[in-house]
Amino acid sequence: MSTKKSPHLFRQGIASEVKLFFLALLCVALMIVDANWSVLEPVRRLSATLIYPFQRVAIWPKDLVRSVYDWSRFVTQTEAQIRTSESARIENARLSMRAMQMEAENVQLRRLLGVKASVEVPSVAVEVLYTPAHPFKETIILNKGSHDGIQPGMPVIAEGGIVGQIRRVTAQTSEAALVTDDKTSVPALLQRNGIRVLVFGSGRPGQIEVRYLSLDVDIKVGDELVSSGIGGYYPAGLMIGRITSIETNSAQGFVRAIAEPSAHPDRHRHFLVLLHTPPDEVDEEALFKEQ
């Protein structure tokens, strides 16, 4: 008599709960053996060797992301350090230039103090605000005006000598015409022989002129021009400039000398205004009756 077998689909075996219990029990046993004895050490090493390639493959994406992140952070930090270093370099250069400028200004101010002590006329220190952009005028704008006692006609001097003369005044500022301005003239004399002359502005930077000299006048290249004090505008003895060339016009019967101003307002910022009320206008032609 044949026995009837159950279909494979419905074949019964050990329950899953029983299998789980025995597996858990096996794990506990292995943990106890591994913790107390080195019997399973060869198995551990073999297992680690076999699964190492799979571990590397599994953690490769994480290593790639970390490498990209570290590289990006390194680039960002490097750029920040470069910007910081560049900013520090620029700031150091600015501070160095400022220190050099302040040192030069201190030297000029000390020289101005020496000039102020040598001039008996009261004076006030001024600073250049700006230079007007005018093609036909040689002028500068100063930072003090009538509130500080400055009036039109007062002379402006520096450690090198005469700079110019106040032309216009407001409450807080004043405009000074330089000795090179074509509307400016200064009574002067040649320091070598005392001959009185009149110095005119040429209208060009760095150049003044001595006009209306007779053909036999004793004047040479290198002669120094100083203020004569005639007219009362400028104290006597202030440097004006040095003769650089002499032009003779026999047809007109005059000699003209070209000179370089001794003061350089384009190189400095601080000057002195002599607080001296200008006298009435002086007939400049009368200065040359003795020529």
Image: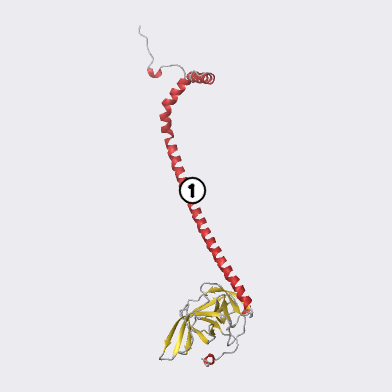
Q: In what element is the residue under mark 1?
A: helix
- Reading the image, the residue beneath label 1 is 77
Residue 287: percent from left, percent from top = 54, 90
* Residue depicted at 55% across the width and 67% down the height: 104
Q: What is the three-letter code of the residue carrying label 1?
A: Gln
Q: How many labels does the image show?
A: 1
Task: Pick whichever, 250 or 187, lies toward us.
Answer: 250
Residue 268: percent from left, percent from top = 54, 72
Residue 181: percent from left, percent from top = 49, 81
Task: Pick whichever, 199 or 190, lies toward us.
Answer: 190
Residue 74 seen in render: yes
182 vs 265: above or below? below
* Residue depicted at 44% across the width and 24% down the height: 47
* Quadrant showing the N terminus: top left
Q: In which quarter of the image is residue 176?
A: bottom right
Q: Which residue of the protein is positioned furthest toward the top in this rendering?
A: 1
Residue 145 seen in render: no
**Is residue 47 rendered to the left or right of residue 144?**
left
Colour treatment of the image: secondary structure
Near mark 1 (Cα within 10 A), the count class, few <14, some 14-19 or many ≥20, is few
* Residue depicted at 57% across the width and 78% down the height: 157
Q: Which residue of the protein is positioned furthest toward the left in this rendering?
A: 2
263 vs 51: above or below? below
Residue 177: percent from left, percent from top = 53, 80
Task: Pick whichever, 244 or 84, lies toward us.
Answer: 244
Task: Pick whichever, 1 or 190, lies toward us.
Answer: 190
